[in-house]
């Protein structure tokens, strides 16, 4: 089975940097995804990691360590519109579906 | 191009009734997924289709839930004898294929409320 843990809530200030951590335990691993979800809206794709290391995409970066079962999403130059839930999801080996964590609600304040 | 669309956006029904939820995937996407999301939780996998066939239905909670995709495009999730515990947002996602590198793109969901 899979177990995915991420903090429930985080707060940060506009213009700052925030790191959202995700740890997972899975019997097999085939990629980790981060999605952003604003209240009442669809999850939108942010990043995908399958190899160890950092993937950078504009203000957002995602890091993966497969040996540690650990990932983080780094958001730079925070904007008010970044207030949302951030979902960590693992694709188990041999499966096409995703197993999601409960999400981290990020609140960005002025 | 158009994203994944779902109808209705909201559905209120009474306990015991039958409901159908529709998903229109992105054109050309062969894989289609249904998830269910309860308040404060991440999406939970229900069933996925590769083409017309259900490749994995292990997430369906019981036999009251059924889904079809007869022509390999639009899918319908059907729930019989609804219960209050079925209340949730039902999300549909699609991807180009079911390969492990393919990104799933989500629709806005259908919020189901069972009274």
Image (spheres, rainbow, N blue to C red):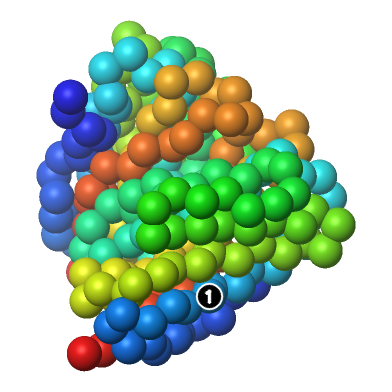
Residue B114: percent from the left, percent from the top?
24, 64
Chain letter of the residue beneath label 1 in the structure image: A
Helix or strand or loop: what does disc 1 sit on?
A: strand
Quadrant that contains the C terminus of chain B: bottom left
Asked if residue A86 can be seen in this view, the reply is: yes
Corner quadrant of residue B68: top left
Residue at the location (41% across, 70% down)?
Answer: A76
Residue at image point 22% right, 76% down: A80
Look at the image and tell me in which quarter the N terminus of chain B lies.
Answer: top left
Q: Residue at x 39, y 53 (%)?
A: A58
Considering only vertical position in the picture, is B111 above or below B64?
Answer: below
- Please state the horizontal and vertical placement of residue B63, each as a whole percent of the image: 50, 42
Which is more toward the observer, A66 or B97?
Answer: A66
Q: Can residue B44 be seen by looking at this rendering?
A: no
Q: Which residue is mark 1?
A: A19
Q: Residues within 10 Å of mark 1 (few under 14, many from 20)?
A: some
């Amino acid at each position: 089975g899979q177990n995915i843990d991420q903090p429930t809530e985080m707060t940060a200030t506009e213009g700052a940097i925030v790191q959202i951590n995700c740890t997972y335990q899975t019997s097999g691993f085939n990629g980790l995804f981060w999605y952003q979800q604003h209240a009442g809206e669809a999850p939108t794709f942010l990043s995908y990691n399958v190899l160890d290391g950092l993937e950078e995409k504009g203000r957002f970066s995602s890091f993966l360590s497969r040996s540690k079962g650990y990932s983080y999403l780094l958001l730079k130059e925070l904007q008010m519109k970044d207030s949302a839930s951030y979902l960590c999801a693992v694709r188990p080996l041999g499966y096409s579906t995703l197993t999601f964590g409960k999400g981290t609600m990020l609140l960005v304040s002025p | 191009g158009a994203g994944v669309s779902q109808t209705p956006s909201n559905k209120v029904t009474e306990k015991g009734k039958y409901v159908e939820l529709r998903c229109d995937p992105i054109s050309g996407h062969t894989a289609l997924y249904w998830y269910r999301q309860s308040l404060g939780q991440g999406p939970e996998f229900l069933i996925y289709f590769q083409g017309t066939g259900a490749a994995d239905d292990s997430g369906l909670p019981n036999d009251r839930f059924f889904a079809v995709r007869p022509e390999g495009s639009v899918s319908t999730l059907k729930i019989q004898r609804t219960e209050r515990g079925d209340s949730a947002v039902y999300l549909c996602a699609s991807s180009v294929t079911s390969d492990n590198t393919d990104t799933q793109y989500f629709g806005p969901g259908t919020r189901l409320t069972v009274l």
